[in-house]
């Protein structure tokens, strides 16, 4: 130090120098010099404000300390409280941080392993509470940024110009083709959201559907839609947990529920499917996933998805292998989810004023950052989106090629076992 006042040679006091180093560390964590980090009263670091793609603006020194100590939790907490903000191209800033920290340090990997080893509370009561925490925010809230049919899962964009409404219908058609649904088929759906897929399967494919959901608000909304659309006789919406599913079905489908089941209960889900699915039945599970097993971000788990765990494909096999289910097709729609989340984020921002009126500033900031992070994580590959099609291993009535996925014609299915074996020699 130079002088008795504790100032450094450049006029910054010792505390300011420490804070400046912390700011530089946060900037380095993005791995990209095109960003800027600011703290009131301390020299900003990174690109000049007029050149920066995005700026992380920290409002107070306590927030800086909390962010440095526990960034995974505190970025979201401080943003929700208004003690920091992401300005400019926030998605690109989060993307850059993910890419720069893709490997993670040994401490973070150790903590992640400990979190993975921690059991999730997936009791019936806890599952209902978790669903209520996230999904029972209010239907009007979701109507502000979802598509008109209220699908809160990855859409499917056949072309670059496809809009969100059309892409969600295309996703439902894609699922129906994968399941080879025919008029009169009995379908069981586990986790049905606001009911759009169940209603689509009944209306477009002539199926009879029983759909389960633990969210009361979603179930009531789905029943209202069934009445309005004249489909109440073909679709039964049941407010209950997937573990209480009964009856038999020709097709079993679950879109966006497996993330909430937890790996410890995959065998239990497999048993449910095994007791329901007919010998020639088909199944499809659509889920957010990961390439490597990791816990959910602590802030996401605390504020948005308690007791959630996106699976790897290897973990998903615990559903299929014990019951001799054969996997027919696996598709990864990661970039489709990134595009879906971009559309949600755009609509959310357009309606932000009304969002704040409905849920308050803090919750609005929470959801805004969540959607920003969703776009970023799917763009960089930190998250995946798996669709897995399966059947019983003894079922020969399966697609001969994948042509049926891209046409409405129900051709390409082996009608008898002899069709698939004819003309093939012994191995």
Image (cartoon, grey):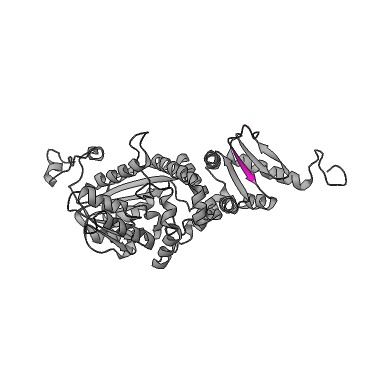
x, y percent for residue 413: 17, 43
Q: Residue at x 27, y 50 (%)?
A: 200
331 vs 364, left or right, is: left
Say which quarter of the image contains residue 249: bottom left
Q: Is 328 within the magenta?
A: no
The residue at 30%/46% (across/down) is 172
Taking depth in this image into account, of 47 and 195 the one nearest to the observer is: 195
- Of residues 297 and 322, the one nearer the viewer is 297
- Residue 283's x, y, as percent? 26, 52
Give the farthest residue toward the right: 4
The range drawn in magenta is 47-57
Residue 307 appears in the picture as rendered: no
Q: Is residue 285 visible?
A: yes
Q: Nearer the viewer, residue 140 or 49?
A: 140
Q: Residue at left 43%, top 42%?
A: 343
At a point 83% along the width and 46% down the height, the residue shown is 6
Question: Dominant secondary structure of the magenta stretch?
Answer: loop
Q: Is residue 50 magenta?
A: yes
């Amino acid at each position: 130090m130079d002088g008795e006042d504790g100032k450094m040679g450049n006029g910054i006091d010792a505390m300011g120098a420490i804070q400046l180093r912390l700011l530089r560390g946060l900037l380095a964590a993005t791995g990209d010099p095109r960003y800027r980090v600011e703290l009131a009263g301390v020299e900003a670091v990174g690109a000049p404000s007029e050149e920066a793609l995005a700026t992380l603006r920290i409002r107070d020194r306590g927030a800086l300390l909390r962010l440095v100590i526990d960034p995974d939790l505190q970025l979201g907490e401080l943003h929700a409280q208004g003690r920091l903000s992401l300005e400019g191209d926030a998605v690109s800033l989060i993307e850059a941080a993910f890419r720069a920290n893709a490997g993670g340090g040994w401490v973070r990997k150790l903590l992640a392993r400990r979190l993975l080893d921690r059991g999730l509370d997936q009791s019936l009561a806890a599952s209902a509470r978790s669903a209520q925490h996230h999904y029972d925010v209010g239907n009007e809230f979701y109507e502000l940024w979802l598509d008109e049919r209220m699908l809160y899962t990855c859409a499917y964009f056949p072309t670059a110009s496809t809009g969100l409404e059309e892409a969600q219908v295309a996703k439902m058609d894609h699922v129906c083709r994968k399941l080879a649904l025919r008029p009169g088929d009995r379908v069981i759906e586990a986790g049905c959201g606001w009911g759009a897929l169940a209603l689509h399967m009944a209306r477009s494919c002539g199926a009879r559907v029983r759909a389960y959901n633990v969210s009361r608000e979603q179930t009531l909304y789905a029943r209202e839609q069934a009445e309005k659309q004249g489909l109440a006789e073909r679709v039964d919406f049941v407010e209950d947990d997937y573990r209480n599913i009964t009856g038999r079905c020709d097709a079993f489908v679950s879109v966006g529920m497996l993330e909430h089941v937890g790996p410890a209960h995959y065998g239990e889900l497999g048993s449910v499917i095994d007791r329901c699915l007919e010998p020639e039945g088909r199944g499809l599970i659509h889920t957010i996933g990961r390439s490597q097993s990791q816990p959910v971000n602590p802030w996401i788990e605390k504020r948005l998805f308690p007791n959630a765990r996106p699976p790897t494909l290897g973990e998903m096999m615990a559903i299929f292998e014990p019951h001799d289910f054969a996997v027919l097709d696996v598709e990864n729609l990661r970039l489709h989810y990134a595009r879906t989340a971009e559309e949600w984020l755009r609509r959310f921002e357009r309606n932000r004023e009304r969002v704040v009126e409905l849920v308050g500033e803090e919750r609005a900031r929470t959801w805004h950052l969540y959607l920003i992070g969703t776009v970023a994580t799917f763009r960089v590959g930190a998250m995946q989106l798996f669709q897995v099609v399966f059947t019983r291993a003894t079922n020969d009535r399966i697609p001969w090629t994948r042509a049926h996925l891209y046409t409405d014609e129900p051709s390409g299915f082996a009608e008898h076992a002899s069709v698939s074996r004819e003309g093939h020699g012994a191995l």
